[in-house]
Amino acid sequence: MPVSAEGNTNLKAHARKIFQAAVDAVDPETAVHRHVVRSGEVLKIGGQQMNLDGFNRVLLVGAGKASAPMARAVESILADRICAGAVVVKDGHGMPLQSTTVYEAGHPVPDERGVAGSEAVLALAAGAGPQDLVICLISGGGSALMVAPAKGISLDDKKDTTRRLLACGATIHEINTVRKHLSRIKGGLLAGSAHPATVISLILSDVVGDDLDVIASGPTVPDSTTFFDAREILQRYAIWKKVVPAVRDRIEQGIDGLVQETPKSDNPVFACCRQVLVGTNLQALEAAARAATDLGYRPLILTSKLEGEAREIARGLGAIAREVNQNGHPLRAPACILCGGETTVTLQGDGKGGRCQELALAASLPLAGLANTLLLAGGTDGNDGPTDAAGAIANGLTRATAEKMGIDIRDFLQRNDAYHFFERIGDLLITGPTRTNVMDVYLLLVGK
């Protein structure tokens, strides 16, 4: 069957609708309202009921791309009770709030504004007493945004380490393990600052497996990692000798017991802490599947825990697309196969892009020539890497289109320059900041 330009145009429109349904399903304000309900002075959060009259003050703190709309939702529920608040968000993700100060800061590499916002968060937490309620709002991006360097570590030291970890292909679990051991706020240390207040964290997950101690580096939960783990990660990626001496010194001192380890599950600071997961990648995929059904596709959710090198994942998804086309397996067309998770990119060039754009560009090779077949890879936060795109769309015509324009796909892949490739052929996925973040959504559409 020849590849149809008209058919691929229809698939693009459908893919965008399905992706938008996934994003809408994890809207931060809606997610908070699903889990936080007030009736008079009785507050129910995630199945726990408490009397507001039992608290002297209610404080809001937090960080992440979704923390501002999450704060707005909490303010709408507890407007008359909130005394003060501070949240740190990515540039462009702020909004006016009633009682909460919003600090915009750099992401994914931290900056001085993130330090200022984090100090405000720590100050509020440290000032909380035993009869206060601290509501902590955590979402994706919180690790980079909530930055309070440990003693002996400068912001430049953390920026250098972050850049090296991002460039070497480390997973978010590994990156956050290192971050926690260079911080005064991550790895349960925010809970330590707020102790003995009651701390309830509302969490929008952006990590594979929804591990609470990984999301935003777990500021209010026990840390399961150690200084030894941090050193092992830096050594595994051959950057231990490349990070600045201050980072190596702190980690070595921690291993030797000269610097206190992050608090573990037996630490009493967690006795009054509770966590409520309000949004996940699986919820987004389930909504995408419903939208695909409404558009006439047979949906299949493969996993919400996809990890690995973007190019390798692209080859796997390309193989599945061919299987559907040729054998009707794992399901017959029209089909919508959905995955979620977070891939990594090991940088080799100096181009512009992100993991979703890289995945889509790599997928354009195995998809070449497939009739009515498309792959969309998009970040639910609307920002893929340091770009203004959420991701990109590749289909059976992408390679042929590039060749007609004199563009070499492999050259752009070698330079990690997926953004400029898709910009030239007009297939960037642009949504603007969504103010939510539950990792990425990858969808394969195979039409009739």
Image (cartoon, helix red, strand yellow):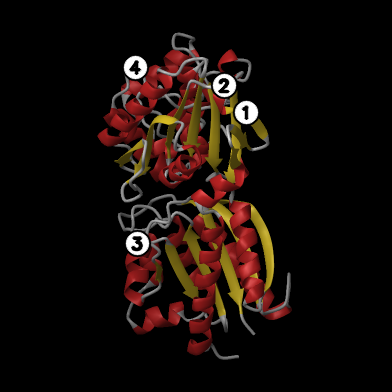
Q: Quadrant of residue 338?
A: bottom right
Residue type, label 3: Asp
Q: Quadrant of residue 351?
A: bottom left
Q: Residue at x 38, y 53 (%)?
A: 385
Q: CA distance from mark 1 to mark 2?
A: 8 Å
Horizontal placement of 283 versus 394: left or right? right
For marks 2 and 4, the one nearer the N-term is 2
Residue type, label 2: Gly
Whether residue 211 is visible here, answered yes or no, is no
Q: Which residue is mark 4?
A: 151
Q: CA distance from mark 1 to mark 4?
A: 38 Å
For marks 3 and 4, the one nearer the N-term is 4
Horizontal placement of 292 versus 3: left or right? right
Residue 54's label in the rendered image is 2
Q: CA distance from mark 2 to mark 4?
A: 37 Å
Q: Secondary structure at mark 4?
A: loop
Residue 417's label in the rendered image is 3
Q: Residue at x 32, y 37 (%)?
A: 110
Horizontal placement of 105 versus 398: left or right? left
Q: Secondary structure at mark 2?
A: helix
> In front here: 211 or 268?
268
Is the residue 396 above or below the residue 417 in the image? below
